[in-house]
Image (cartoon, helix red, strand yellow):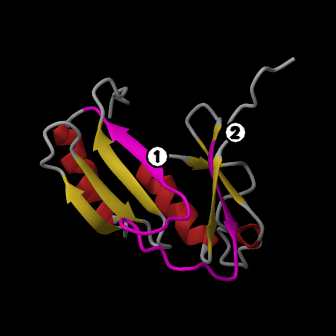
Amino acid sequence: MLEHPVLRQTVLDAVDARGIAEFYRRLLGLRYRIGDEPPTDGGPDRQARDWLALRDDRGMPVLAVQPVASLPPVDWPGGHQRVHLDLTVPTTEDLEHQHRRTLDLGATLLLDRSDDEHEPLYVYADPAGHPFCIFVAPGTPDDGH
């Protein structure tokens, strides 16, 4: 018998489920669960009306996005948040590289603490307003890219 449940994945609500799934797919180098890919024929995106799941390179669940009609605004930092993802990189060089990528993908910078000598970090909002951090954590595995 299991002593503890296993965290399968984090689920985000989004008004534009496909847009947020694409943001995180590209940011984190994930791939869609089979059947959740965007339609290639230009037809309706039926799956994005229900649920989209993203997997890592081993096929393990990481993140899912479910559509909702509306979301309250987030006023974090300093207020409330719906969910908060912590993403790590091994070096400040990696942090700056990911900072540029993250902004290019459409995130909004909320807080710049990149000069913190103990834990350099940036806080962003994804295109739907979900806050997340990218920070330097020594010992973060280097994915070899």
Predominant secondary structure in magenta? loop
Q: Quadrant of residue 17?
A: bottom right
Q: Amino acid at mark 1?
A: Gly
- Relative to 105, say whether 6 is above or below: above
On the image, numbered disc 2 is attached to which residue? 8
Q: Position of residue 101 (x, y in %)?
A: 29, 57
Q: Nearer the viewer, residue 139 or 31?
A: 139
Q: Position of residue 83 (x, y in %)?
A: 54, 58
The residue depicted at 64 percent of the width and 82 percent of the height is 70
Measured in 3D between alpha carbons, the distance from the residue under mark 2 to the one under mark 1, in whole angstroms, is 18 Å
Q: Nearer the viewer, residue 36 or 60?
A: 60
> Which region of the structure is painted magenta?
62-90
- Left or right: 82 with respect to 28? right
Q: Nearer the viewer, residue 127 or 34?
A: 127
The residue depicted at 27 percent of the width and 32 percent of the height is 90
The residue depicted at 23 percent of the width and 40 percent of the height is 119
